[in-house]
Each structure stands twice: as C-alpha cells, then as structure tokens.
Image: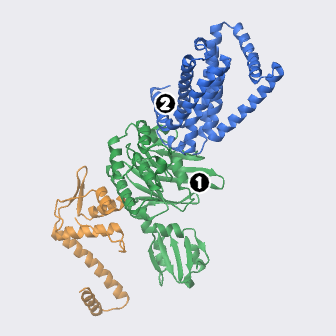
Chain colours: A orange, B green, C blue
Amino acid sequence: MRIVISNASPDPIYEQIVGQVRAQILSGELSEGEQLPSIRRLARDLQISVITTKRAYEELEREGFINTVGGKGTFVAAQNPEFLREKRMKAVEEKLAEAVEQARLLNVGSDQLVEMLRLLYAEDE
Amino acid sequence: MDYALEIDGVGKRYKGFALSEVSLRLPRGYIMGLIGPNGAGKTTLIKLILNLVRRDGGAIRVFGLDNLADEAAVKARIGFVPDEPRYHDDARLGELASAVAPFYAKWDEGRFRRLAGEFELPLEKKFKKLSHGTKTKFALAVALSHGAELVLLDEPTTGLDPVFRRRLLDTLAGLLQDERSSVLFSSHITTDLERTADFVTFLKDGRVVFSDRMDRLAEEWAVVKGGREMLDADARAFLQGVRVRPHGFEGLTSRVDEARQRFANGFVIERASLDDIMVLYGREVANDG
Amino acid sequence: MTANGLRQDWLQLRRDLILHRRALLPAALIFAAFQVYFVIAIQHPTLWLVFTCVYLSFFTVIPPNRDDRFGATAWSCTLPLSRADVVRGRYVTGWALAAALFVTALALATFVPGSKIPPAVFMDPDRLLLAAAVATFIIALLLPFALRFGFIGVMLVAVALQIAAALLFVVAKITGGQNSVEGGIAAAFRALAAGVAALRATLSVPVFQLTLLLTLVLVNWLSYRFSVALFRRRDL
C-alpha cells in the first residue's frame, strides 16, 4: 500500500488517504484479502494522528472497500468490479442530473451543455 | 468510554492569575495537545493532575481513580516530563534512576537502558553538567520506563533539536500502539501537535477556549481573509478574532459554513491551523503595521 | 503502619542516602571530628549528651533542604507517594540519621582515649530518655517548618532557638549566680532536672520512664500530623 500525504493539498488528510486507497483497490494494486496496516501503525508511519487514520478507515469501510475483522486486522474487501463500476456510474449520473437542473434554471439548452462537457473533457487532456 | 483523564470544572487561584472551570476528557489510547500562549495555565493544569499544586475546586480522575484519594496508585501509572527538569545537581544520572526505580512496581530496567542508549544519555555524568535538552531526555527515559499508561509532557520540545523532536513524536506514537496508553502534551509550538494530536485543548487566560477532536477542529475553524474595506461592524461581531494589516485583514471563525455564506465574494476562506487559532483568537487590534 | 508503608519508608531512606551522601558524609565526618574533641574537653557528661543531641538533630533537615535547594522536592511528589507518605519518609530518614550519628557519638565516647564520658552514660535509661527528648524537641520543631517553608523555615527555627537559648542564659545568670556560661546553663538545667526528678519520685521509676517515652512518641506523632497538614498545602 502506497500513501503519500500532501500538506499543500486543500483536501483534509483523511480524504487523501481514502482517495488513494480506493484508487489502489480499484486499480488492483491492492488485491482482495490483502491486509492493511492497523490504524495506529499507519498513523505512526505517516506521522499523523490516530483519529485521522481511524476516520479514513471508517470511511473506506462504509464505502465497502475494506473490512475490519475484530482481533485480526483490516483487509481489502472482496470487490465486485461490475458492482463498483455501476455504483460509481450512478454517482456520475447524479452529478450530471444536478448540472442539468442548474442549466435549466439558467435557461441553458442541452446543446450548450454538451458543448461545455466536451470542452471540459478536452481541458483534462 | 474508557477515559485516561477526566478533568471537571477545576480551578486554581494565584495572585494575579487564575485557572477557572477547566474541563477536558482524554479517552484512552490517544494524544491530546494542550495549546495556548505562555502564561495561559498549561503548566498549572498539568501540575494539578499530579497534585503538585493544590486545586481550589473541581475533580480530576485518572483511569477513573480520583487523583487525590488514590494519589499513589495514580502516580504509579503516570510518567511526567516537566518543562524544567530539576534533580540533584551533584548526582549522576545513573544514581538518580536507581534511586527511584524501586518505587515503581513496573520498572523495566532493560527498557531504561535501551532508551538511555537511544537518547545517548551520559549516565555517569553529574546532573548539573547537562544541557537542558539532555535533562529533558533523561526525564523522558525515566517517564517511559515504568509502564506508564498516561504520559504528561510539559513543553518537552523546547531545547530539543529538530531531529530529536521527530524522534520524540515517533516514540510517543509508538506508545500508543497498545491502544491503552495516552499522552497529554503541552506546547506553545503548535507545529509539533498539528499532525499527530488526536485531541486538542486550547487554554487562554486560564480558561478553556475549546477542547475537541482535531478533525472536528479542522472542519469548523477557518481563517477569513479579505480587503480592509470589507471588514464592517457586522463582520467584526461575527468573527472570533481579527487582525488588520495594511494590505487586508485576517479573521478567525469557528463556524466555517456560516462564514462561507456570509463572506461569499472576494474573500479567501482557509482552514485554520492551530497556530492561526492561537494567534487570532480574541484578538482585536486596530492596526498592526 | 502497613507493609507497603514500611517499604515506601525504606525506599525513601535508600533514595536519600544515595542522593544526599555527598553532603551527609562530610557533615558526619565533621560531627565525628568535633566529637573527638568534645568528649575530651567537656566536663559534664549530661551536658555533652544534650549538646550532641541538639547537633545531630539538625542533620534531619539536610535531605529536605537539599531537595528544596535543587528544586527536586517536586520530583518526590511525582513518585507513587501521597503527600503524607513523603512526610513520613522524612521523619523516618531523619530519625535514622539521628540514630546513626548517636551510635557514632557513643562509639567515639567509649573508645577515644581521654574521653570524659563514662560508658555507664549509655546504660542509663534516664540519660537515654533525655537524649531522645532533646532530639524529639528539635526534630518535632524543625521538620514541619523545613517541609513547609524549606530552608527559610529551618533558619526561622534556628533563630528562634537561639533567642530561646539567650533567654535561658539570662535566666541561668539570674538564678545560677555564677559567671561561667557552662555553670549558668547547668544551673538552669539543674532546675529543670529537679522538677523532673520530683515528678519521677511521685510516680515509680519505670512508670515515669514509660510515660516519658510514650509522651515523646506522641510528640513525634503530633509533629508528623502537623507536618502533613502543612505540606499538603504547599504548592510546588
């Protein structure tokens, strides 16, 4: 598991951890059943507070990425890639629905919105 | 909830200074930072836990035991590193350690030797010949060698070089691995605590400004920055501290969501660091220059 | 007196011996050297006994005073001890030191050639009780103030005692009618001794001795309780 904390990032530290672990699980870098360091071990290694790592792990567990087995440790949960993708697609859909609603309020037509989307994709590349 | 330390409404009066209605709770297995400017009462509070000074009211419980009724039992489980370690000048470090070791049922001589080696303590040297940093390291070695479940450190990092400061924080983090040991760490240098503290209590003028989880703090406290002309009476009333400079103002708020709505355009709102809070809280200065 | 309490007292005595030996040993040597001179020069064994006991009683405040001087008293109070335990340790260590010095004086008085102190002095229960009474008187006064006020407390007591001694001297001059200091003081003590002897004659000798011994124990205990009350209020 690879975690790099950035002090300069606007994201709170626990979110950075959640994001990085999530990405590594999704990409397969962290495999199913692999054991993660304990929250205290991780806190010590990253030189951050236990409360932060605890929160990160709680968040990851809530999202279904990891499991904590009492007394044994924390492990990467069995991931169903289809299900996960579906879940994230749903999140994208929700965000788009929001954008559409905002656009409607401003009387922005769907063509303009699609154009904006295209531009945004181009920006990232 | 298992608490390592519970302080309830504690007070202490001195001539010209008083600690009043101080309350805080430290759950087992975590680090609490005690921050505040010099003279805020941090050392007094730590001394009250150890009954080095007599309290004027309130209650203090350590591991659920009353710190006065069970004084000896409580102190057997507390390790203490004072801000100014003072021992017998003409005694050698090794003698000081062997003089007190048998008082502790859980004294671990092997661990003390290891720590003394790690910290490079000259056990044969007399106490008066040592630098402040070495004296602090000695106090730390003793504090960590008797199985203490609560370690109290009063301004431990002054006088320590940056390398050892890191090692100190790492040693404390190592302590917490057993999930039973807890640390209370007072400092007016907030950078040490910023990342590693789980809880923080801010003392100012003998009172607790807040005592909370670090992450909640990060979520709720913010610094609002903007041009001087944008600082009206309303804004001043809302902010919990403000510093005006030639190029603009900096304001402190503990209600970041409200602030985001109120100071919507043309303002910069950032997460407040512990230092920001300490510097800005309660501050009302017309012009700083 | 619990087993744990005794163990704590022993640990405190041990700690004091380790950490204060660099001051105690030279002081003890000076005491011994003075005794060598004293046992030869003195005329009255009883007077020797009283002065010796006054002298060695002051040793009891060396550990607390040195601790205060180095700012180490607070350290004692961070150990697994209550304030009362710390005070009790001072008394135990103090009396242990006094007893050790008394035995030393005894040995010197017996073996130094030319000593005017007959060994019979130490077999006499009355004289031993007198020694204990003098030591109790000084220690019971010194320790509470030393513990509460540190070195200043000891100075206060020493000054108070000197004033009392001066007054005694004046009284002795008036009643004793002699010019020599020793004679004057001896006369004052003779008056005191006469009063005590009268009491002794009223009760039987063993009862008197036992009563006196118990009174001394009581005085020590009262002094200890007083010290605890004072020390508990002290901010370190």
> Of residues B155 and C55, which is closer to you in this image?
C55
| Residue tagged 2 | C9
> Of residues A23 and C146, which is closer to you in this image?
C146
> Percent from the top left, x then y, of residue B182?
40, 50
Please state which amino acid type lies under the numbered disc 2: Asp
Q: Secondary structure at mark 2?
A: helix
Question: Compared to C231, does A58 lie above or below?
Answer: below
Question: Compared to B73, does B190 lie above or below?
Answer: below
State the image quarter where residue B103 is shown.
Answer: top left
> Percent from the top left, x then y, of residue A44?
32, 58
| Identity of the residue drawn at 38% across and 47% down | B144
| Residue tagged 1 | B19
Does residue C72 appear in the picture of this structure?
yes
Mark 1, mark 2: which one is toward the viewer?
2
Q: Is residue B31 left or right of residue A77?
A: right
State the image quarter where residue C222 is shown.
Answer: top right
